[in-house]
Amino acid sequence: MHPFIVSEGIYGQFSNIVVFLATFICFLFPFAVTGHEQLAEMKKLVQNRKIAIAEARNEVAHEASAKLERIFEEWDHIKECRAQLREDESALRAAIERFTAPLD
């Protein structure tokens, strides 16, 4: 029995599997790096992924705020166009009424 194998319920079985897999991997790949080196590499990988995620999050937030700003600008432009359209419609109706009004 391996000196690190303990059997205490489900957690013991899980650690047994982990120890077995680690031993098996070390047997298959004797040229592999040490556990400390692997841990350092994994920490570096995790840190790089966290940085990439943060950069992507910032980029998405920037793009979303730019699109939202553009939407607000378009909405203001639409409101101005609708107001101008109402004014033009009122002026046109007044002109039609003057043109079609009976002459007294």
Image: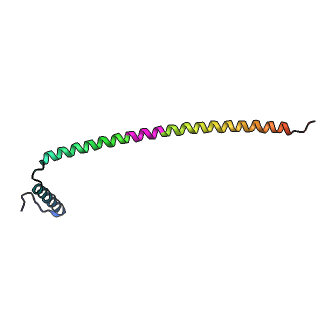
Answer above or below: position of 1 versus 85.
below
Q: Is residue 61 magenta?
A: yes
Q: Residue at x 87, y 38 (%)?
A: 101
Answer above or below: position of 60 versus 4.
above
Q: Position of residue 14 (x, y in %)?
A: 18, 60
How would you classify the magenta stretch by its main secondary structure? helix
Left or right: residue 8 versus residue 48 is left
Q: Is residue 13 magenta?
A: no
Q: Position of residue 60 (x, y in %)?
A: 41, 42
Q: Coloring scheme of the render?
A: rainbow
Q: Quadrant of residue 59?
A: top left
Q: Residue at x 26, y 42 (%)?
A: 48
Q: Quadrant of residue 45?
A: top left
Q: Residue at x 16, y 47 (%)?
A: 38
Answer above or below: position of 97 versus 5.
above
Q: Position of residue 1 (x, y in %)?
A: 6, 62
Q: Residue at x 58, y 36 (%)?
A: 76
Q: Quadrant of the C terminus?
A: top right
Answer above or below: position of 41 versus 10.
above
The region drawn magenta spans: 58-66
Q: Quadrant of residue 51?
A: top left
